[in-house]
Amino acid sequence: MINWDVSPEIFSLGPIHVRWYGLLFAASFLIGFQIMHKIFIKENKSENDLNDLLWYMLAGTILGARLGHCLFYSPEYYLSNPLEILKVWKGGLASHGAAIGITIAIRMYSKKKIGQPFLWVYDRVVITVALAGFFIRTGNLMNSEIIGIPTDVPWAFKFVRAYVTDPMTPRHPAQLYEALSYLTIFIVLYFIYYKSYKKIKDGLIFGIFLVSVFTARFFIEFIKEDQSAFEAGMALNMGQILSIPLIIWGIYLILRKDISNKVTT
C-alpha cells in the first residue's frame, strides 16, 4: 500500500500559492506549443498561425472544461449561482467539456486559415491534447482528487488528503491509470504522425485519438468514485455516457471511405 500524503501546494509567498495542478496545466500548454511548433515548421506553416491557434486552444480548453463541469455534473447549483462558474480557482474542470470547447475553437480557427482544414488541424492538435491529459491527471493525483474505489491490490493508494469519509481506505489510483494511458496514447499518435503524416488522410489520427482516449476513460470509470451524488446507482456514470458519442465519432473517422491509406510502420 502507498500512503499518499502529498501537499497540492509546491510553495506559497503571502497570498500567492503555487500548486502542482496549475504548474502541470501550464506545462501541458508550454510543451504542447513546442511540439506544435516543430509540426508547423516541418509542414511549412506560419508561426503566426500557430500563435493564433494557441489562443484559440487556451480559450476553448478553459471555457469548455469549466462549463462542462458546471453543466454536466452540477447544473442545478451553478445555474442557481451563475457567478460561481467564474470561480475556476475553486476547482472543477471536465475533459468532455474541454473536448467540446476545443472542437468549437478549432472549427473557428480553421475557417480563417487557408490550407488548414478542420480535420488537418485536429489531427495535429490531438497529439498534444493526449500529452496534456497525462499532465492534468497527474495534477489530479497531486490534488488527491478523482480517486478510485476501495481495493486490496498491492499498489493501492491511501489518499490521506482526499475529501472522503474514509481517507485511510486503500483505493485504486485511478488518476495514475488515466495518466499512463494518455501518455501511451501520446507516444503512439506521435509515432504515427511522424512516420506517415504525408500518406494518411485527414481525420485518421483524430479518430484514433477519440477511440483510444475515451475507451480508456470509459473502462477506468468503473473503478472511480462518482464525481457527483446524482451518479449513485446509475449503470453508467456521466463520464461514460459522454464518452460513448465521442468513441462512435472516432470509429466513423477511422472507417470513413476517404481514409483509405494505411499507416506505415
Image (cartoon, rainbow, N blue to C red):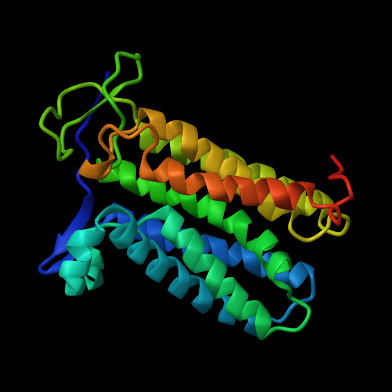
Q: Left of 263 or right of it: where is 172? A: left
Quadrant of the rendering where the C terminus is positioned: top right
Q: Is residue 215 above or below residue 190?
A: above
Q: Nearer the viewer, residue 166 or 30?
A: 166
Q: Nearer the viewer, residue 50 or 206?
A: 206
The x, y position of residue 68, in whole percent, is 37, 61
Q: Left of 39 or right of it: where is 100? A: left
The x, y position of residue 21, in whole percent, is 31, 54
- Residue at image x 61%, y 57%? 126
Q: Nearer the viewer, residue 178 or 228?
A: 228
Can the viewer see residue 50 in this picture? no
Q: Nearer the viewer, residue 61 or 38?
A: 61
Residue 72: which quarter of the image? bottom left
Residue 228: which quarter of the image? top left
Q: Is residue 244 above or below residue 65?
A: above
Q: Is residue 94 above or below residue 156?
A: below
